[in-house]
Amino acid sequence: MKLSLLEICYLIGSITFILGLKMMGNAKTARKGNLIGAVGMVIAIIGTVFLFEKKDTNGVLVENFTVPTIVYILIFGAIALGTVIGWLTAKKVQMTKMPELVSMFNGMGGACAALIGLMEYHHNIGHTGALIAIIAGLIIGSISFSGSVIAYLKLNGTLNKPVRLPAYNIINTLFMIGVFVFGAYVVYAEPHGSGFLYALFVAALVYGILFTVPIGGADMPVVISLLNSFTGLAAAFGGFLYDNKVMLTGGILVGSAGTLLTLVMCKAMNRPLSNVIFGAFGGGGATAGNGAEVNGSIKDITVSDLAVLMNYSKKVVIVPGYGLAVAQAQHIIHELELLLEERGVEVKYAIHPVAGRMPGHMNVLLAESNVSYDKLVEMEDINPEFDHTDVVLVVGANDVVNPAAKSDPSSPIYGMPILEVDRAKHIIINKRSMSAGYAGIDNLLFYDPKSSMFFGDAKKALTELVAELKTM
């Protein structure tokens, strides 16, 4: 079969997407993979704009079809505007705000899919297959958009508590069924009116809000990943609609990758996806479990004592958390790592799959400060090493090191795999205060006899620690 130049562009784009995604599975090649995928996207866009072939409703090529110049001006004007906004936003965003940025960008993808549905519906009346793809993309894209907006508001603290209506599981389930039944009606309705189409659009937006609002803050990384898969699925329906192979491939890759990542994170928390969606936690008070009292005392440690302890250690494991990102302390912690290594101390970083506010948050944060990828050790590999670790330094992490996950059946995080830092000889916890973590529960690790609290802003406290070590 003879391939057209446009199909070759789509083939190249699809291959680069697959290669780029494969390379992003490894921290060492992730940057290159991202660039390869971007090049493929540019090729696909240029091919679509300049090699577009107009076909009639029967798929027959329309001869002598030309695109007005104003259309090219509008297309490239929109691309330029979006590129500038996206580039400047991504360059200026702080690492603490990266999850919000990812959520909002993902929402924009869903909004695009929904707008495609609104524009193309009336152009495809009478073609049931096309209408199914349009309505499916409209519904899923709208849910992804409004859900991502709510996720953004939760991540930046505007909606810092889940909002749960009475019997919200039943309400949400019935609303979801109603939206899809309504969507089927819009596909087969006679006559096809705009009123039903826009009503469906609004209903899908409302369901996206209802879907995301009850979910607690501790589950936001899972929700972001799930909404990302929704956007990919909506884009794939657009690929079906336009018979656009690269759009279809990209949508399938995003959708499947988002789904797999969602399942991986659910496994990391030892919770089924249904429990995240229908039994969300994260809005409770600071208790060890369901109101259980924590008995015990805490002790703090001075910067000089901590410097001595670390200076004479053989192995130190650093556990980064969201507090490290908030304090922008990734550079000073890398300096601490290098200083300890100069003195013969082995230093590693323990990475929990759901640490931070989005998948891979800690990996990206530490990569920004040029921490070697080889020092970032995943939970399953680092846990056996804690028995032989002299000092564990927990910086801004909370729920992912909470022993309640292993010992307190009443705790909402019970059964979640954690970094077993309580097995180390000495545990140092750097926090601003004794406040609860993102899951809203108290941390039993604070009261462990081997634990010492190193209070203060992470950047300031670690700077003082580095200065103290340099004097020794």
Image (spheres, rainbow, N blue to C red):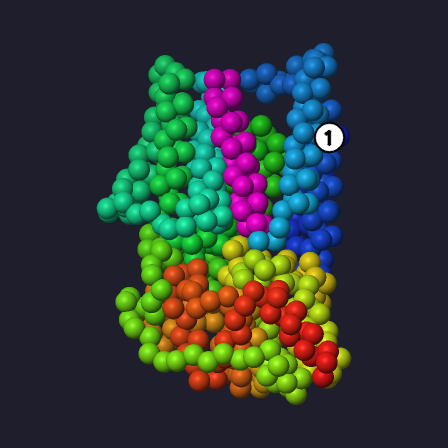
> Which residue does the image show at 69% across and 49% down from the upper left?
34
Give the residues drawn in magenta, as a range.
97-123
- The vertical placement of 63 against 101, above or below, is above
> Which residue does the image show at 73% across and 47% down from the upper left?
35
Query: Is 114 covered by the magenta stretch?
Result: yes
> Residue 371 placed where, x, y %?
70, 66
331 and 472: which is toward the camera: 472
> Residue 303 placed where, x, y %?
60, 78
> Which residue does the image show at 49% across and 48% down from the upper left?
156
Query: Is 413 covered by the magenta stretch?
Result: no
> Which residue does the image show at 72% across and 63% down from the upper left?
370
Q: Main secondary structure of the magenta part?
A: helix
Q: Is residue 463 left or right of residue 164?
A: right
Residue 43 in sight in this render: yes
For residue 191, what is the image quadrant? top left
Give the labeled residue for mark 1: 46
- The vertical placement of 455 against 230, above or below, is below
For residue 194, what is the image quadrant? top left
- The vertical placement of 428 against 196, above or below, is below
Q: Secondary structure at mark 1?
A: helix
Residue 192 in sight in this render: no
317 and 75: which is toward the camera: 317
